[in-house]
Image (cartoon, rainbow, N blue to C red):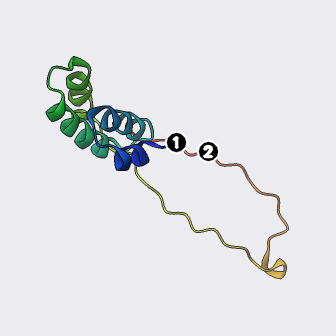
């Protein structure tokens, strides 16, 4: 079960915390920040939550790039081999 599914089944601070951690790991820091704020309202004595909120306040989200995948007819396809390109994160 994923973190969002767990929250639909049972809304509690543990589920919010797990989803916030998952969102943070994939670079969705704003969403993680808001989940942690809600989590902190439910569990104010947790120092780990407080520390994560402090750290996330400064972070920016990764930029989401929408990619469209399509297939060209063989007649229009290039005969040159593909070139491997490396994308670098600017954050």
Q: Residues within 10 Å of mark 1 (few under 14, many from 20)?
A: few
Q: Quadrant of residue 32?
A: top left
Q: CA distance from mark 2 to mark 1?
A: 6 Å
Q: Residue at x 29, y 36 (%)?
A: 59
Q: Quadrant of residue 11?
A: top left
The front one of 31 and 13 is 13
Q: Residue at x 49, y 63 (%)?
A: 66
Q: Residue at x 28, y 44 (%)?
A: 30
Which residue has dot 1 on it? 88
The front one of 20 and 29 is 20
Q: Secondary structure at mark 2?
A: loop
Q: Position of residue 52 (x, y in %)?
A: 27, 26
Q: Position of residue 46 (x, y in %)?
A: 21, 20
Q: Secondary structure at mark 1?
A: loop
Q: Residues within 10 Å of mark 2 (few under 14, many from 20)?
A: few
- Left or right: where does residue 23 sit relative to residue 53? right
Q: Are marks 2 and 1 in contact (CB under 8 Å)?
A: yes
Which residue has dot 2 on it? 86
The front one of 1 and 66 is 1
Q: Residue 37, relative to residue 84: is it above or below?
A: above
- Which quadrant, please, contains the C terminus? top left
Q: Position of residue 49 (x, y in %)?
A: 24, 25
């Amino acid at each position: 079960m994923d973190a969002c599914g767990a929250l639909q089944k049972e809304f509690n601070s543990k589920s919010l915390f797990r989803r916030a951690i998952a969102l943070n790991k994939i670079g969705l820091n704003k969403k993680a920040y808001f989940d942690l704020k809600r989590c902190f309202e439910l569990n104010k004595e947790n120092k780990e939550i407080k520390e994560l909120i402090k750290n996330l306040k400064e972070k920016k989200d990764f930029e989401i790039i929408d990619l469209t995948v399509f297939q060209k007819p063989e007649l229009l396809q290039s005969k040159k081999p593909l070139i491997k390109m490396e994308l670098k994160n600017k954050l």
